[in-house]
Every structure is written in C-alpha cells, then in structure tokens.
Image (cartoon, helix red, strand yellow):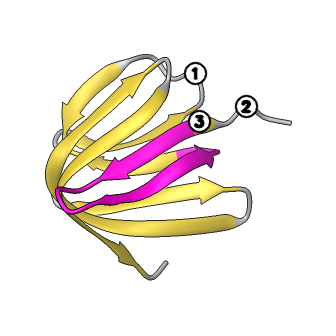
Amino acid sequence: MAEKLHFSLVSPERELFSGQVDQVDAPGAEGDFGVLANHAPFMTTLREGRVVVHDGANRRAFDVRGGFADVTPDGLTILAESATEAAV
C-alpha cells in the first residue's frame, strides 16, 4: 500500500479538510503543482483556482482565492484567503 500524505485546507472561517490522501493538486502562483507523500519541502503563494484532493478513486475539489501552501515532512497545509467546496 502506498504511503499517504497528510493534507489540511484552512480558510479564515474554518478548516475545510483534514486527512490522509494520495495526492493534492493546487494552483501555485508560478504554475500548478502536485504533492505526494514525502515531497521535498517548499512554500509558495497560491493564485485563484481549484485544489483537487485525490484519495484512491475518490476526488474532492475546492475553489480557492489566494493564500499559501506549505509542504513539510509532516504533509501539506494550505492556508487560503477564501475557499469553498466545489463539484468535481
């Protein structure tokens, strides 16, 4: 079984998602990026776009407007200026 990535998506109002997933795709200011377990650490700003969370055959999507993404050895945290769940 593949190793999982801990992902947390937080907006000023509340935490929209927290859990173990396979992959997260996000809209970085310099281009879209994907994060898997054990990704090299980095931090970037986000542009307006869609964050897609992959867990096996399941997907969830969130529309974000601005914020930051922080990849650490513990996982990925997105602090979004605004975020809402969207249909996949």
The answer to whether residue 16 is above or below residue 75 is below
Instruction: Residue lying at the far bottom in this picture: please name it.
Output: 87
- The outermost residue toward the front is 14
- Under circle 3, the secondary element is strand
The part of the image, by quadrant, that contains residue 54 is bottom right
Q: Label 3 belongs to which residue?
A: 5
Which tag, 2 or 1, sits closer to the chain's start?
A: 2
- Tag 3: residue type? Leu
Residue 46 appears in view: no
Residue 12: x, y in percent?
Answer: 17, 56
Name the residue beneath numbered marker 1.
Answer: 38
- Disc 2 + disc 1, Cβ < 8 Å: yes
Give amino acid for label 1. Asn
Does label 1 or label 3 sit earlier along the sequence? 3
The amino acid at mark 2 is Glu
Q: Residue 30 carries which label?
A: none
Where is residue 82 shown, x and y percent of the image? 17, 63
Residue 64 appears in the rendering: yes
Magenta stretch containing residue 9, yes or no?
yes
Query: Image quarter for residue 52?
Result: bottom left
Which residues lie in the magenta part?
6-23
Per the model, the C-alpha gap separating discs 3 and 2 is 7 Å
- Tell me the CA gap for discs 1 and 3: 8 Å
Question: SS for tag 1?
Answer: loop
Give the alpha-carbon distance from disc 2 to disc 1, as whole Å.
8 Å
Q: Does the magenta stretch include residue 78?
A: no
Q: Pointer 2: what residue?
A: 3
The prevailing secondary structure element of the residues shown in magenta is strand
Q: Decide: marks 1, 3 in contact (CB < 8 A)?
A: no
Residue 30 screen position, x and y as percent = 18, 39
Q: Quadrant of the N terminus?
A: top right
